[in-house]
Amino acid sequence: MSFVAGHAGPDIRADVRVVAEPDGQFSFSYESSVKTLYGEAIERQVQEMAVDWGGPGLRVHAVDSGALPFTWRARLGSTFAQAGYEAPRRAAVRRSPRTGRLRRSRLYVPGDTPKLLLNASLCPADVYVFDLEDAVPASEKHAALWLVDEALRSLDFGGAEVSVRINAGEAGFAEAAFLADAGVEAFWLPKCEHPEEIVALDRTLGQIGSLARVVVLVESALGVENAYDLLRCSPRVVAASLGVEDYLRDIGAQRTEGQAESAWARGRVLNAAVAAGVMPLASVYPRFDDLPAVSAYARTARAAGYEGVGCVHPAQVPAVHAGFTPDAGELDLARRTVEAYEAAAGRAVAVDGRMVDEPVYRRAQQVLTLGEEQE
């Protein structure tokens, strides 16, 4: 029986494929493209890990393509755990969730690819969503879990919100428990249909003392019908989004450029989010080869009341931020609106031929706040 984690091959970079087989004692051999430079460091790290794990009785062979230490730890840890050995305790990483966060852009990062995890911080997204669900094949989920855990413990993601999209159901609850002390600020819970699912995740996180928030992904007709109840069932819930592709598959529709087929569901989830007091987030924009269209999509989302959109490629992030940035004319009008209304001591007043009452004043304040946050 063999236990495997990682990838190797001519097109693989920054990864290591580890194969472990039961044996009477621990032994290690490897091939590496960087053996001349880093061979001693690799061998030392592997031997130290074997000691920390209590000397697993495994014969380990690795094929390395320039993996960094966090990837070595993840791939070795996954194979050791698959073989039934218990992981040593590690110090918790603390990233305290903050209120008032911008979530204009969230970049989905597949959790099974080391180089993408490593390069995520080069992209100035507001939120990184390290994905263990749809982006990861079933056969890779165990190894991806270990890889995301080590990346969260080892890499610096600046001021971005660090989050993970777990799988639905019990598998996802186990993933959340595994990752809770790795500094996860929010867990994205997919395919939500019943409040009990969110309450169960809340309970799991509470039992281990995690402060992580929850973002609810509504992805089915039943989920849309239950949206308000989903979003108000736990104080951990801070945001929500409609998973358009899954929803359309559920109702048997096809996505079109105009999105008329999902308009009702998008509006239902947005309204439920606002009513429940959580942040409404728009779905991803699937194309990344047309950045003006990405910005236009973001502008339309902001005008509709959303506070962010999803990104499937780093190139989309600056375009999304541009779409969420009020232009000079919008800021000028908002500033004059606020000044005029406040000068009138809260009475209705006209600005540029338009009546300004309290709702218009409040919207103008929001525009100014958004502009200040993005300076």
Image (cartoon, helix red, strand yellow):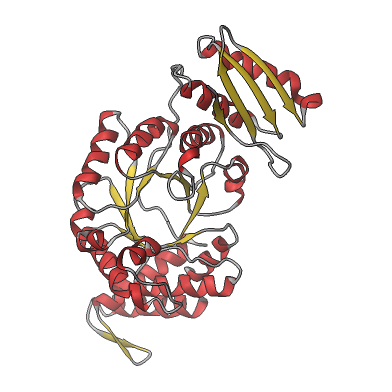
Residue nearest the viewer, comparing 157 with 291: 291
Q: Is residue 211 visible?
A: no
* Residue 21 image position (x, y, % from top left): 57, 19
Residue at the limit of the structure toward the top, as seen here: 24
Q: Is residue 36 visible?
A: yes
Q: Residue at x 45, y 42 (%)?
A: 138
Question: Quick check: 325 left or right of 121?
Answer: left
Query: Dividing the picture into quarters, in which one does residue 93 lie?
Result: top left
* Residue 155 image position (x, y, % from top left): 56, 36
Question: Quick check: 203 left or right of 281?
Answer: left
* Image label count: 0
* Residue 314 image position (x, y, % from top left): 58, 57
Q: Residue at x 34, y 75 (%)?
A: 261
Q: Residue at x 40, y 72 (%)?
A: 254
Where 214 falls versus 320 (above or below)?
above
Where 83 falls versus 185 (above or below)?
above
* Residue 227 image position (x, y, % from top left): 23, 60
Q: Residue at x 50, y 36 (%)?
A: 152
Residue at the limit of the structure toward the right, as seen here: 36
Residue nearest the viewer, comparing 361 with 176: 176
Residue at the limit of the structure toward the bottom, as seen here: 353
Residue nearest the viewer, comparing 116 with 345: 116
Residue nearest the viewer, comparing 172 with 5: 5
Query: Dividing the picture into quarters, in which one does residue 18 lie?
Result: top right
